[in-house]
Image (spheres, helix red, strand yellow):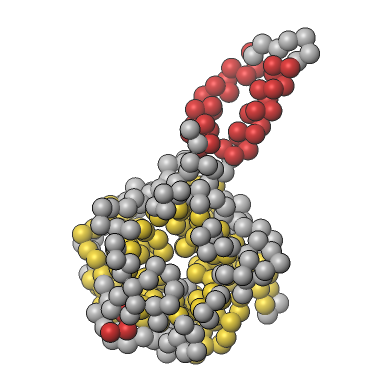
Amino acid sequence: MNLLSVCIRVQPWLKYWPRMHTDAHGWTKRAVTALLVFVLSGCARYADFMLPAVAGGDSAPFRFVAQTGPVLRRGQFQDALNPSVVGRKNLYSVFDGRTWHTALAISDDGIHWTPRGIVLSPDPRTWEGTYIAANGSALEFGGKLWYWYDAGPKERKRIGLAREEGGGWRKEPAPVLDYGPPGAWDERAVADAYVIRIDPYFYMYYLGQDRAVRQRIGVARSRDGVAWEKLRTNPVLEMEEDEAGLGEPAVWQSHGFYWMLFTMRDLYENRHLRLARSTDGVRWTRLPVTFSGTEAWDSKVICDPSVAVEGGTVKVWFGGGDTASPDENLHGQIGFATLVK
């Protein structure tokens, strides 16, 4: 039994705690109190919640209409992937053959991008290690960019937070989203954050990996973007038989629904985008559509969507590559598409 199961089972018994028998030295009650403090400290990271309900509307799936070529090329890097677009800014990920960094590009139209260089790298003196500080989700809040990103060993990533400050970036000293307890669906890794804001909460959709290397999608919420509570009934999106893993979700609201565009790895490590919709952000209905690359540069992989809704138009920036790979060395570049009804 994992800790989450214990949390669910122990909470109904709390009403009996005041009447529990105590010996002359108070040992029984003290022992149980210590046990409850330990268990419930883990339980505090979980909650039952949904996003604000939406009424539903145009339920027809979208068509994925992509531009022919990449809009942001890899240049001197092995890969340029994982766009996260906020206004004129794009925080995207670049791989130099050893390490993933976060870079910045600027555009006035979302199509023609000017790279401005690396802005975030892993700090080997900290929990981040040397492999990655990238693959993140940017959001403007309080007039500044907040950026939740992957860091840590390649097979054991966690999610950190950096915020714009004084012309640079200030990182939180520890991960803001950590592994689940032993036996949990996300006990081995958490990654691929995609954060949206619906007052008074931030909501984070993310990849979780268990000991069987199954990769599924869950959700957490936070009032401050730092302390997160995970949905008790995670994951919200399960793998299907033809899928080697799910990840890289992008969630937005339009046409009466919450929509999720997410990456699916097939059994040959090709990657595609699939689509789901929901009226509460927790219970998702998959739609029978799969979006795949149609050009030479993205013939094996499309992944990492970043979505913006502007005047009724759903814009998507995405990663693409010509080599089947679950992570890197796929000659990754960034493309642009619109989702059309």
Q: Is residue 224 visible?
A: no
The x, y position of residue 148, in whole percent, is 55, 64
Q: Which of 315 and 318 is in front in this view?
A: 318
The x, y position of residue 176, in whole percent, is 60, 56
- Drawn side of residue 330 relative to residue 90, left or right: left
Residue drawn at point x = 61 percent, y = 75 percent: 120
Residue drawn at point x = 47 percent, y = 63 percent: 192
Q: Quadrant of residue 40?
A: top right
The x, y position of residue 231, in whole percent, is 47, 45
The x, y position of residue 169, in whole percent, is 66, 73
Q: 284 above or below 295?
A: above
Q: 56 above or below 66?
A: above
Q: Quadrant of residue 177?
A: bottom right
Residue drawn at point x = 72 percent, y = 21 percent: 30
Q: How many labels does the image show?
A: 0
Q: Which of 97 and 310 is in front in this view?
A: 97
Quadrant containing the C terminus in the rendered view: bottom left
Q: Which of 283 and 152 is in front in this view?
A: 152
Q: Is residue 175 visible?
A: yes
- Drawn side of residue 248 relative to residue 136, left or right: left
Q: 36 above or below 281?
A: above
Residue drawn at point x = 40 percent, y = 61 percent: 247
